[in-house]
Image: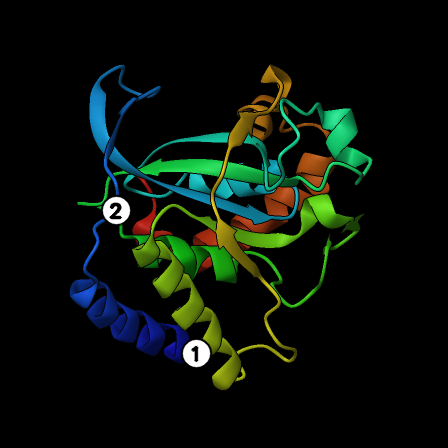
Amino acid sequence: MNIFISLILLLAAVSCSANDKSKQVMEKSKMNNKYTATDTATIGAGCFWCVEAVFQQLEGVVFVESGYSGRAIDNPTYEQVCSGRTGHAEVCNIAFDASKISFEEILEVFWKVHDPTTLNRQGADAGTQYRSVIFYHNQSQKELADKYKTKLNEAKAFDNPVVTEISPFTKFYKAEDYHQNYYNDNKSQPYCQMVISPKLKKFEEVFGTKLKK
């Protein structure tokens, strides 16, 4: 964890000197039915069921939606994306309160809860739709993601180089309703028990102080 703590401190200084601020949007909170000013992060780290389950637990995250992003094909279906022919990645749109959690902290969790060194694969999930990717919404997010990735590779934080794609955000297509809140609604399913539950346990052990009360 020392490497990651050092990197977070370094990137915090970079963030303070960045000229452009994250664009603020008004999103309706699904948890308290109130309007909250939020920033948005769009990331892919394998199956979006896993990503959603992790980020839903973080203090400062307002809500998470699973969907598809990365290519120009409009309104792709899950079946089309799974074919690997659309070029879309499974991603999560994460609306977060920047006064409670920073984009740097979002990145810290992102790189700790998946393997960013495997190209187009996470575990048994293989294909371009499962690629490690950050779709940045502004120049500040781009600079922070690029610098963090560079520092991870320079520090040899992983056995192999980080191959995470860092690309500009274009469009987000919300996935079908049955994909939303998947883990919480399907905890007894084999994939949830065998893949998501162990990932959440490790996540909670590392980031226990950052979880919602």
Q: Quadrant of the N terminus?
A: bottom left
Whether residue 205 sits left or right of residue 71 in the image: it is left
Q: Position of residue 162 (x, y in %)?
A: 59, 71
Q: Residues within 10 Å of mark 2 (few under 14, many from 20)?
A: some
Q: Residue at x 74, y 55 (%)?
A: 123
Foreground of the two, 144 or 10: 144
Q: Is residue 146 above or below residue 86?
A: below
Foreground of the two, 156 or 50: 156
Foreground of the two, 149 or 186: 149
Q: In the rendered image, which quarter is residue 205 located in?
A: bottom left
Question: Count the marks: how many?
Answer: 2
Callout 1 secondary element: helix
Indicate the amino acid at tag 2.
Ser
Q: Which mark is residue 22?
A: 2
Whether residue 92 sits left or right of residue 47 in the image: it is left
Q: Residue at x 65, y 68 (%)?
A: 117
Callout 2 secondary element: loop
Q: Which residue is mark 1?
A: 151
